[in-house]
Image: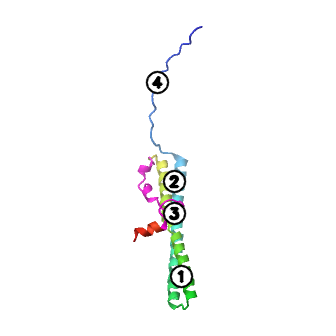
Amino acid sequence: MTEAKTKARPATPARKNPGPQAVGGKAKAVLGRQAAALRGVRADNEGAVLQILAQLDAANEALAQLKAQARGKKAQATMAELEATLTGMVEGCSTQDLTGQRLERVARVLEGVADGRAVAAEDDPFGDRLLEGPQEAGDGLDQSAIDALFD
């Protein structure tokens, strides 16, 4: 039997990561348009929410006037329910700011990719610290814990 001779392979030199590279031509234009589209969505969303909030504010003012004139426990109870509903609607609009921040973040990432800039989390001026808004059910603080912070 003959032994198979194995030749040692020379070590392959490690390739240097050239780092991020800008995309060119069409791809850069597409990424730029998508970043602009996200900013447009953010602006449209913000405008719609501001319009909703203005209408809710007007409804709250009208409700305050009605409450001042209302007689009877049933009318007062109905207005209290309406006030709670309007407050819930205002709270529902609060996600607009967080959504806008997230859209801006994605737009910046797209522009960074198009320009060949690093887009690591540490390069993000917002970072995750501003994106800790509405929590998933069961995560974060419950309302009583938040209320206790103000006591």
For the residue marked with disc 3, what is the amino acid? Arg
Name which of mark 4 and mark 1 comes first in the sequence.
4
**Residue 80: mark:** 1
Mark closer to the observer (2, 1): 1
Mark closer to the observer (4, 3): 4
* Badge 3 element: helix
Q: How is the image coloured?
A: rainbow
Q: Is residue 34 or residue 12 the one in the foreground? A: 12
Mark 2 Cα-neighbour bin, 10 Å: few <14, some 14–19, many ≥20: many
**Residue 137: mark:** none
Which quarter of the rendering shows the N terminus? top right
Name which of mark 1 and mark 3 comes first in the sequence.
3
Report which residue position mark 3 lands on: 42
**Residue shown at 55%/52% (left/top)?**
30
For the residue marked with disc 2, what is the amino acid? Gly
Report which residue position mark 4 lands on: 11
Relative to 78, say whether 12 is above or below.
above
Residue 120 visible in this rendered orientation of the protein: yes
Name which of mark 2 and mark 3 comes first in the sequence.
2
Mark closer to the observer (4, 1): 1
Relative to 47, say whether 104 is above or below.
above
Instruction: Kindly report the secondary structure that dominates the magenta region of the rendered protein.
Output: loop
Magenta residues (range): 118-143
Measured from the top left, where is residue 150 in percent x and y?
40, 70
**Residue 32: mark:** 2
- Left or right: residue 118 compared with residue 138: left
Cα separation, mark 4 vs mark 3, equals: 52 Å
Cα separation, mark 2 vs mark 3, equals: 15 Å
Cα separation, mark 2 vs mark 1, equals: 49 Å
Cα separation, mark 1 vs mark 3, equals: 34 Å
